[in-house]
Amino acid sequence: MRRSCGQSCPRSCGQSCPRSCGQSCLPQGPKGPGRHPQGGTGGRSGTRQAPAEQPTPGYVQRHRTHLHPGAWWLWALSLGTAATRTTNPLLLTLLITVSAYVVATRRPHAPWSRSYGAFVKLALAVLLVRLAFAVLLGSPIPGTHVLVHLPEVPLPDWAQGIRLGGEVTAEALTFALYDALRLAALLICVGAANALANPSRLLKSLPGALYELGVAVVVALTFAPNLVADVQRLRAARRLRGRPDKGVRGLLQVGLPVLEGALERSVALAAAMDARGYGRTADVPPAVRRTTAALTLGGLLGVCAGTYGLLTAEGGAYGLPVLLAGVAAALAGLWLGGRRTLRTRYRPDPWDARAWLVTASGVAVAALLTLAASRDPAALHPGVVPLVAPTLPLWSAAAVLIGLLPAFVTPAPEASHTRKEPTT
């Protein structure tokens, strides 16, 4: 048993006491040199007090810097819905710019967040393919401004309505450009959701009844980010070895390792899901199962009937009540269906005020553009026959700018900690 020295510590550096007491010393202060942290001088009268329990720093930091993934998806899907309500190229370009700015400022430093560039390239490919089809296969849009006259291939009588070659008009190309740009904006909005929302945390936030379906959807959504990460990793490895990573040869030599990695990942995922009890359900009474099926099926039918009533002029009176009743029945069915899936959530993501603001900004953009499309269809759908230059409606443009709100109300992503190699 160690005996205390009973003397004052001669040091004032805060290091351990060199004497037999073994405690730490404090710097010199008004209480005199060599006083120990408990206020004693190293004797047996000093008592240690347990420090107060503090919350885990990582947990507090995670909740402060992470937004609920469902809010990002609702925001992105609302912007995509707004893109489907217009063919104005100026508004569609503004929507793409808004989503790109939010992704550039709030994209986390994670492998799955690098898929945004792949979605942008996919949108450009869709745009080019749509224009190529308009040039080669023609367009039903009549036009008088002929740009080029291609040799036309004669086709049999059963292929009427289709032509290969012929006149390429400015009206047909403009119509194809507007139509393709709308689809490209929708793809870029989906890419923004993939780059901003963590798929594993999104799966954790789903209700128990949708857990199995959510696993399938999340695995499908993470295919593109994992594929992009594998391609970038393999291309970097080939560059370090002095081998070509571009062109057809580089693509073929990278494709086989990427396919092998995808198969290994699928096998590992299946083993992990089986080890965690995926697919196992709890026993519930037959009456509960029948009630769940009836509520879910009736709710989905009510949603379909209510939506049809809202879209038709004759069903405006019963459309909204039937829709609300269907949504309530479907939610009740999901709640009962969650009793079959025994799940626990470790540190669930809270739906806080920032998530409400992000979701409200996207819904506001979709609602305002839908209203503008019904009030002023000529501004949101510029005509191509006759060919006129599109104009930018100011109120619609201001509504699109509301989508920039997540770039200011959400926290900035954590800085990536890169390890520096020692230099000699």
Image: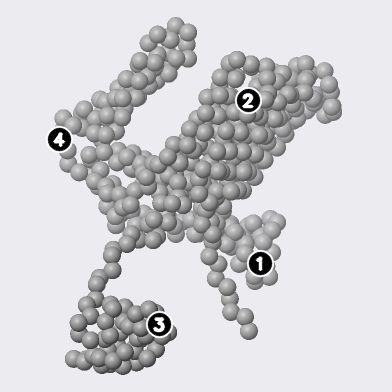
CA distance for labels 4 and 2:
53 Å
Q: Which residue is mark 2?
A: 396
Residue 122, picture quadrant? top right
Residue depicted at 24% across the width and 46% down the height: 342
Is 400 in front, or is 73?
400
Q: Earlier in the sequence, mark 1 or mark 4?
A: 1
Residue depicted at 83% across the width and 21% down the height: 145
The label number, if any, that marks residue 28 in the structure image: 3
- Three-letter amino acid code at disc 1? Arg
CA distance for labels 2 and 1:
47 Å
Q: Earlier in the sequence, mark 3 or mark 4?
A: 3
Residue depicted at 70% across the width and 30% down the height: 90
Q: Which residue is mark 1?
A: 239
- Three-letter amino acid code at disc 4? Pro
Q: Earlier in the sequence, mark 3 or mark 1?
A: 3
Q: Is residue 227 visible?
A: no
Residue depth check, mark 2 versus mark 1: number of the one nearer the observer: 2
Find numbered disc 4 in the image and state the secondary structure of the residue it sits on. loop
Q: Is residue 282 visible?
A: yes
The label number, if any, that marks residue 285 in the structure image: 4
The residue at the far front in this view is: 30
CA distance for labels 1 and 4:
61 Å
- Three-letter amino acid code at disc 3? Gln
Residue depth check, mark 2 versus mark 3: number of the one nearer the observer: 3
Q: Position of residue 77 (x, y in %)?
A: 51, 34
- Mark 3 is surrounded, within 10 Å at the Cα level, by few (under 14), some (14 to 19) or many (20 or more) other residues, namely some
